[in-house]
Image: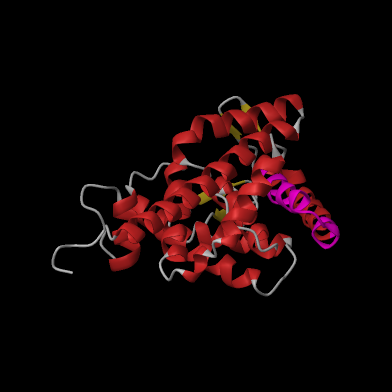
Amino acid sequence: MNSQTTISLLDKFQSLNLSANIDFDKFNHYAITHHSTSIEGSTLTEIETRLLLDEGITPAGKPLLHSLMVKDHYDTLQFIIEQSGKKNLVTPEFIQFVNAAVMKQTGSIYQTVFGELDGSKGVFRKGNVSAGNTYFVSYDKVAGLVSKLSIVLADKITTAVSATDKINICFDAHFDLVTIHPFYDGNGRTSRLLMNYLQLYFGLPMSIVFKEDKAAYFEALQQSRKLEDIGIFRKFMYAQYEKYLLLEIEKFELINKESEKGGGYSFVF
């Protein structure tokens, strides 16, 4: 992990003021949604994601569930963008609302010893869960751990000074929430959106966990838990952040170069 490289790229990215481009934010939000939902199994391509969100065109031959997942994620992303401007601290209720929004159209009904639970309502799980070789904390500890996470975040948010401290808070919150795994489904998407919310809160660009790096992402999560070393996950996320910032900087510079040469236009123009 080289946080100085990240800070240098971050400074350059912010100096470009890409949000001044009317389309940058829109396509950036599409990309975040596309990669996050692809990690969770969506088969929509980036073009299909754009057409769905721009024109409401549901792709033929793809499960409707995947389109609903994409639409719910995008709508939830718009919600956290709006909320970030209000500078509200993270609470358990906020985390539950984000999960409910992510699972709005795809949440399942779960039969538990406590009765029927609706996975689209942001309810904490009432059963123990595992994923592969990973067993998550007992369900009876979930509420307390989410509450503790909110308290710790409130303290860190108000005392963070350096850009590195702020970035670490965002990455660590992502790791902590997905490790608690408080919900029956949507934990990954909710955790990445929590990270994005905190980045917006701090005035930082939002991160993308790239779908092509899914295996490395899961490995970083697993190894950080196994070795109890958050540095492993931070190193992965710093690399993802640098990858994103560098891609956008290169894209901007290429467009400017083509514009200066008079390229990129049709003969009609």
> Where in the figure is residue 72, as x and y percent of width and height?
45, 60
Q: Position of residue 216 (x, y in %)?
A: 54, 30
Between 98 and 142, the one nearer to me in the picture = 98
Residue shown at the point (61%, 64%) measured from the top left: 97
Across and down, in percent, residue 105 comes to 43, 60
Apparent side of residue 22 relative to residue 239 in the rendered image (left or right):
left
Horizontal relation, residue 32 to residue 151: left or right: left
Question: Looking at the picture, does residue 164 appear above or below residue 132?
Answer: below
42 within the magenta span = no
Q: Residue at x 26, y 58 (%)?
A: 264
> Residue shown at 34%/61% (left/top)?
259
Give the farthest residue toward the bottom.
86
Magenta residue span: 155-175
Asked if residue 147 can be seen in this view, the reply is yes
Give above or below for 141 relative to 120.
Answer: above
Q: Name the residue at 66% across, 63% down.
A: 203
Residue 150 horizontal/vertical position (percent): 77, 57
Q: Main secondary structure of the magenta part?
A: helix
The quadrant in which the N terminus is found is top right
The C terminus appears in which quarter of the rendering?
bottom left
Quarter of the image for residue 158 reads bottom right
